[in-house]
Image (cartoon, rainbow, N blue to C red):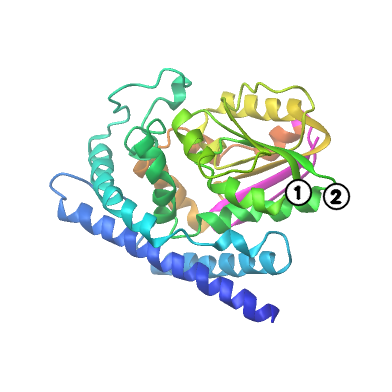
Amino acid sequence: MKNFIENSIVASNLAKTILYSTEYRIMNQLSKSFSFFVKPPYQEKDKELIKYLRDGVLKLHQEDAKNIADGFYPIEVIKPKGPKEHLKNLPHLLLDSLKISRRRKFNIKKDFDIEPEDAPDYLKRNYHFQTDGYFSEQSARLYEHQVEVLFSGTAGPMRRMLIKMIKEKISSDRPLKILELGAGVGSATLDYAKAFNFSSYTVTDVSEHYLNAAKARFSNPKLKFVQTAAESLPFADEEFDVVFSVYLFHELPQAVREKVLLESQRVLKKGGVLGICDSLQKDDVPRLNCVLENFPIDYHEPFYKGYTIWKLNSTLHEIGFKNIQSQFKLLSKYWVAEK
């Protein structure tokens, strides 16, 4: 029975991969059709590397299924979005892909009708060349779909790998106080809120529009939503049992990354757990270094290169974290540490 459940989960995840991969190809073809105006992103042509990535996708889906079968998170995390919502977003996604490609071609990094005033300067840009960066309702509505297309339906499983690592660090069965940094539209929150027993779960992001989109997805009164930058948290010392982030650090300048770690340590209780899910780093998988080199160029990630050579294990140790563990899966890397 367990094998049947795991195989069913893998099949469901692979169906998502096929769907989002198809949409990625459609958007690339659309860009090529308008090549006089726009530029499609870099495409890997190394057949061995492509096979390596495809094998990695299958392995990731299999591990995701095993984690569900082993009880680290419930099967509800793989529940797909309704087809109506997906199809409703698709025309807007295709249109925005042309706008993104135009910004890519002409290297337009700050393209706002109204520049966000209440955001740190380093964020006032069109990350991924997306329309309005992180600062509009339209951007918030399309963001999760865009991420799934970019990662061929593997973003959810990659985010979830951190859940197991955090749970293996937690020794108590009591309800936790959880803090999520840079939650965006709540993509990870949906899964983590199902996976953990918590007395309170505080969801933070610097973007009002993204935080509102996240808030609209939940009715649980134990979830609180706070607009704040991760490097300047409005919380008391030693308030939380778990502090975690998903795909936050690669979008921050070096000095800000270190401030976020210091703030995370400050608000963690003694013995609390820090969890980080982010991008793979240079030389983790040497054959993927070319992918890491092209990503920040194609998707305007100005601090990404610095992140890929950042020695996070050493930084965590210097700050005072202990029992630091790290590993990587497919295109993501994970750290857990204790205060």
The residue most toward the top is 117
Q: Is residue 176 left or right of residue 231?
A: right
Q: Amino acid at mark 1?
A: Asn
* Residue holding disc 2: 173
- Residue at 20% of width from left, 45% of height from top? 38
The N terminus: image quadrant: bottom right
Write the start and end of the magenta stretch as one range: 318-339
* Residue holding disc 1: 197
- Residue at 59% of width from left, 77% of height from top? 7
Question: Earlier along the polypeptide chain: callout 1 or callout 2?
Answer: 2
Tell me the tag on residue 275.
Answer: none
Q: Is residue 155 left or right of residue 69?
A: left
Within-10-Å neighbours for mark 1: few <14, some 14–19, many 20+:
some
Could you tell me residue 329's position as x and y percent?
60, 58
Instruction: Give yes or no for residue 216 being in the magenta stretch.
Output: no
Residue 285 shows up from this direction? no
320 w.r.t. 68: above or below: above
**Callouts 1 and 2 close, C-beta under 8 Å:** yes
| Magenta span main SS | strand
* Kind of element beneath mark 2: loop
Q: Amino acid at mark 2?
A: Asp
Could you tell me residue 77's position as x and y percent?
59, 59
* Kind of element beneath mark 1: loop
Q: Is residue 96 left or right of residue 209?
A: left
